Image (spheres, grey):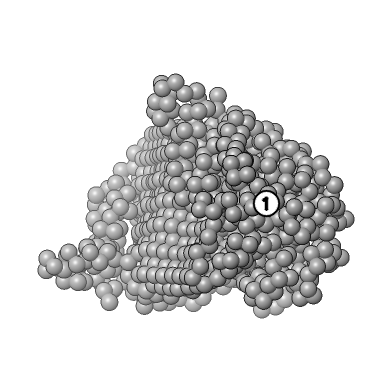
Amino acid sequence: MSAVEKQNPVEARLDALTIPEGGFAAPARAEALARLRAMGLPGRRDEYWKYTNPADLVAAMPPVAPAFDNGDETPVFDAIDRLKIVFVDGVFDAAASDDLTLAGVEIARLAEPADISWAGGLYGKLEADGQTPVARPMAALNTAAATDGVLIRVTGQAARPINLIYVHSSETSDPILHHCIKLEAGAELTVLENGPAGARFNKVMEVDVGEGARFHHVRAQGRDHQRRAVTHIFARVAANALFKSFTLTANGVLTRNECVIDIVGDDAVAHVAGAALGDGATGAFHHDDTVFVTHGALRCESRQVFKKVLKHGATGVFQGKILVKEGAQKTDGYQISQSLLLDDDSQFLAKPELEIYADDVQCSHGSTTGAIDETALFYLRSRGVPVDEAIKLLVLSFLADTIEEIEDERLRDDITERLEAWLNRHQD
Amino acid sequence: MVEENLEVREGVDRETVETVQNMGSYKYGWDTEIEMEFAPKGVNEDIVRLISEKNEEPEWMTEWRLQAFRRWKEMAEPDWAMLKIPAIDYQDIYYYARPKSMETKPKSLDEVDPKLLATYEKLGIPLKEQLILAGVEGAEKLQEGETRVAVDAVFDSVSVGTTFKDELAKAGVIFCSISEAIKEHPELVKKYLGSVVPQSDNFFATLNSAVFSDGSFVYIPPNTRCPMELSTYFRINAENTGQFERTLIIADKGSYVSYLEGCTAPKRDTAQLHAAVVEIVVLEDAEVKYSTVQNWFPGDEDGKGGIYNFVTKRADCREARAKVMWTQVETGSAITWKYPSCILRGDDTQGEFYSIAIANNWQQADTGTKMIHLGKNTKSRIVSKGISAGQAQNTYRGLVTMHPKAKNSRNYTQCDSLLIGDKCGAHTVPYIEVKNNSSRVEHEATTSKVDDDQLFYCRARGMDEEEAVALVVNGFCREVLQALPMEFAMEAQSLVAISLEGSVG
């Protein structure tokens, strides 16, 4: 590495990218670039990256990762009637995608914007707001350099879920995608995401949930072991609105999922949940859930429910925060982070925070870590359940609270099947 | 003689409790007009040498201080705590001040300036030892068979007297000022000083290592139960003076000691710096209880003045089955930055942390603990109660870490915050690191306000609002108050009430 690169990793990273020019997003990209240069890329010494080494995420080029073969497993969400939008290594695949028309919904692409005056004020806006009080340079990098993504505006009730499918093909692909979703007052939409995306993936999703609107998000990150991914969700939730997001993560050498929720209207509800399964025997596993929920209005409810099952040297990280602003009275905030360590080599690192400036609130958090309950295991075995089966049952019951956060029963069942399949594959 | 002395003793106790109950604001806000001897303001190698010289320290100690000072110059003030710390000019502080009458240390307590002793009486040193501090002949004998507390009193930078020395010596217990220990017991000091909190541990501890002026030293020999509770009483008196005391406690194999610490300072418009270090070494099967009632001047209603309290406290359970228990009631100081910690190094060691932190008006507190589990079957328990009122900010910050070798270990953490009023803040910043699966870690935290039903119940029974709030808050703190030794529990309860005065209505 030359001395120049050493001095300035931001420039080294930017040099490896082609930043799209022109279009409605140009001003937002320029601002994001300035933000990024001011912040610098995250390093090991950053408090916000205390438990996750960002080196592979910030390096100019991604480590090589071959595409992963899912075997004969039916792709997730396959049985669901949905509108598919496919990106291969971050490039839109028109042939594999459905027609981008859906009643009550306008869909455009960042790379080919049509009439998207509504998106001008949204692209990069929530990301920029989400940079305080904690800097998120990887998201600024995304806004500046994203090559594609979907722009979705929902005015009514979407008839079908929209499914964003990420396909990984090239072993050096390094896609950067940025989606913007705007739900007008009273609208409703479900977004599904799945697939491994690339050798390294940087994704931002900005969601503006209007008054009384309902947004559901269910994501199954790919089963690829060599994945390095950093993803951000930035959500603004207006009065009486509902925001619900669930993520299933199985495998992945390095995954950092950030979720930044700003509750700005009274009586709104925001839930974010995640289940992560990691087995260090199939390659390293490091999974980091970083959540920041800000309550800025009256009588709102937020939930953070995160559980991890770890074995063979896997590492799970949870950094969660509930910030209740002055005046956000009657807030009901709850956060739980738990991990089940299936053997002695794995570790769980957690930083569950509360920061509260209003007195009439109920906020709490809990965090537990430990092994499988021997008493429960003994009980099941004494009733003739084989040990592997018993462990599987106990793990599933441990994860149940997160799955419960998915409202749609079909999606819940689909995700549960994935969990069981993973546990069957990783029994030793 | 007997009766008279007992009366004084009881009088003080009664007075202490009553005064605490009656006073509306900070009652230790007076200063004592005693002629002081100051070293010039600011800190540099010469000042460090001067402090060392004034304490008649051996060369190795001077060198140790200088080493720390050189490191400190390279360090930056930490900024990670949720505190707004006004810029501190480290060159605008007196690092050494001592009462002139101490210029030649008194050979016995009889020679102590009566004004100093009057100061301690005014403080209502929660206990009875000013009788002994005053050098009343035979006082020590008279107290036999009763609960007694030996005290080391530190006035600004200098230890002014230690009580009950003879009797403690009979049991083999060494309890003296650290400056004395450096001269009399250099082998112990050399072996243990800086072994728990290294010279360059953090910015404030390093500064303390360089300029600490005095403090207390305790050594409990093997298989000895310290015959009485030990206590240090700290007071900052002179203006613009920083107090940097250093406490070193060594509990040898199978021993037990309970240690109490109290502190006050006069009311001043300008803030004062306090950066202390407490090191505790606990050897096999030994047990140490360390209780603090911190009541430094918190600043006035507008946030002017007050003590900036930056304290490093750490206990090392170095050998098997060692136990340590920290209990703290933090009601004072404009800024509190304090994390009494336990290193659970030996197998089957135990650490406990009980804390009440009250912040009112413009006070800021960032306090908590670290439980570092290194040995097998280690246990820790954290109970933290934070109360915020007025415009105050109160943060619990803690670390629980289970190292891969700390098999079968347990931690339970409970931190509750109570908010009184809508302008204050309560925050929780726990770090939890679990690196083996036979250990179990549980953490719970809640934030809520004073329960309206409970308040209504108290009011309906004729209490005024302040009384009712004080009672409810005392109930909220009960678990921690119960962990305090009797002598402190009473005073702490009243302190809880006082600290919250003016926060309702």
Q: Visible in this render: residue B189?
A: yes
Residue A363's spot in the image, x, y percent?
44, 42
Question: Which residue appears farthest toward the front when viewing the image?
Answer: B1
Left or right placement of residue A16 versus residue B450 in this view: right
Dot 1: what SS? loop
Question: Considering depth in this image, is A406 or A211 the residue closer to the camera?
Answer: A406
Residue at 58%, 33% in the rendered image: B18
Q: Label 1 neighbourhood size at 10 Å, few (<14), some (14-19), many (20+)?
A: few
Query: Looking at the rendering, in which quadrant would you find the N terminus of chain B?
Result: top right
Residue A29's spot in the image, x, y percent?
61, 53
Question: Considering depth in this image, is B440 or B352 the residue closer to the camera?
Answer: B352
Residue B483 drawn above or below residue B319: above
Residue A117's spot in the image, x, y percent?
54, 41
Query: Looking at the rendering, in which quadrant would you find the C terminus of chain B?
Result: top right
Residue at 45%, 47% in the rendered image: B482
Q: Which residue is mark 1?
A: B137
Q: Chain of mark 1?
A: B
Left or right placement of residue B98 versus residue A122 in this view: right
Left or right placement of residue A220 versus residue B272 in this view: left
Find residue B341 and report its image quarter: bottom right
Q: Visible in this render: residue A182?
A: no
All told, the count of numbered labels is: 1
Residue A311 drawn above or below residue B156: below
Kind of residue sitting beneath label 1:
Glu
Question: Considering depth in this image, is A408 or B159 the residue closer to the camera?
Answer: B159
Residue at 49%, 49% in the rendered image: B484
Question: Which residue appears farthest toward the left when viewing the image?
Answer: A384
Left or right placement of residue B300 versus residue A233 in this view: right
Residue B460's spot in the image, x, y percent?
41, 21
